[in-house]
Amino acid sequence: MKYSGIGGQAVMEGVMMRNGRKYAVAVRKPDKEIAVEVKSTRDINDIWHKIPIIRGMVSFVDSLVIGLSTLMYSASFFEDEEPVDKSKLSEEELKKLERKEKAEMGGTLVLSFALALAVFFAVPYFIALGLNRVTDSQALIALVEGIIRIAIFIGYVVVISKMEDIKRTFMYHGAEHKCINCVESGKPLTVENVRTSTRFHKRCGTSFIFIVFIISVFVFMFISFDNTWIKLLARLLLIPVIAGVSYEFIRLAGRYENKFLDIFSKPGLLLQKLTVMEPDDDMIEVGIASVEAVFDWKKFQQENEECFK
């Protein structure tokens, strides 16, 4: 399978696709039409994106910001309030509205990140501390902590996947994966071809999170402080570094076919059975619209025609 460089995520009733600096959000509106918005982000070729691990940390933050922004955009089509017509606002009113939106997005991002750290890192850490009464092995305690963390994450995913809105988002997640797999396998990007493509992908965010949890187990085995709170702080400070290392693994796994990489990719792919569901044709159409807004798949397939034979 030829690496295309495109990636994305599911949003509310839609799909976001990113290709270099450009990203597009396609949303199936309540009137059944597809709305597509294309934006640009920072230059993907800047110095930070050339340094291994650092580029993963930067990409992780970028993904969080873009992900929240696109999620808010898609959600705006389904709010009870009438959406603001920005074309009718003065320049001063528009700037004020944009500042308000950025402040709300920043607050939501900080709160969401803090809750994620508390639930998936602090809670397992304090639960595992109880093992200090029966063992002095910090490696064993770190291993148990990691198992608890993964169990909480899987339990969380299982619970939310039962919610109707989340289930539909996971179906759009499937549309995103299937569109990328269709393009990278050399097939024309049509509803029929996308439908028959696999819904699993090595570069998925689900796999990324799972790799973060696995790598954190080994890293946390070597953190040794007497003070409970300093040890927790050290764990939290190392999360960006672990995310950077995990990004490098996902990047390699998505670009190359390798038995070693395949073995470590398997758990993440299995976990995708919970977070990536089969989409319907309407969802696939939204995924295709998002891809075509930022990526010339026909040119890509023509340039790599030999790889698809």
Image: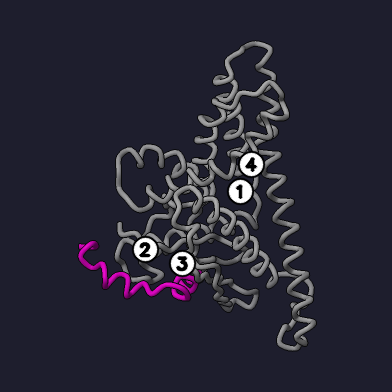
Which sits earlier in the primary sequence, circle 4 or circle 3?
Answer: 3
Residue linked to disc 1: 161
Which sits earlier in the primary sequence, circle 4 or circle 2?
Answer: 2
Foreground residue, 259 or 251?
A: 251
Residue linked to disc 4: 156
Rendered view: 84 above or below 122: below
For badge 1, the amino acid type reads Ser
Q: Is residue 283 left or right of residue 249?
A: right
User: Residue 302: percent from the left, percent from the top?
Assistant: 26, 73
User: Residue 153: percent from the left, percent from the top?
Assistant: 60, 39
Label of residue 4 in the image: 2
Q: Is residue 288 left or right of residue 230?
A: left
Residue linked to disc 3: 20
Which sits earlier in the primary sequence, circle 1 or circle 4?
Answer: 4
Which quadrant holds residue 304?
A: bottom left
Report helix, strand or loop for mark 3: loop
Cα distance, mark 2 to mark 3?
Answer: 11 Å
Rendered view: 232 above or below 75: above
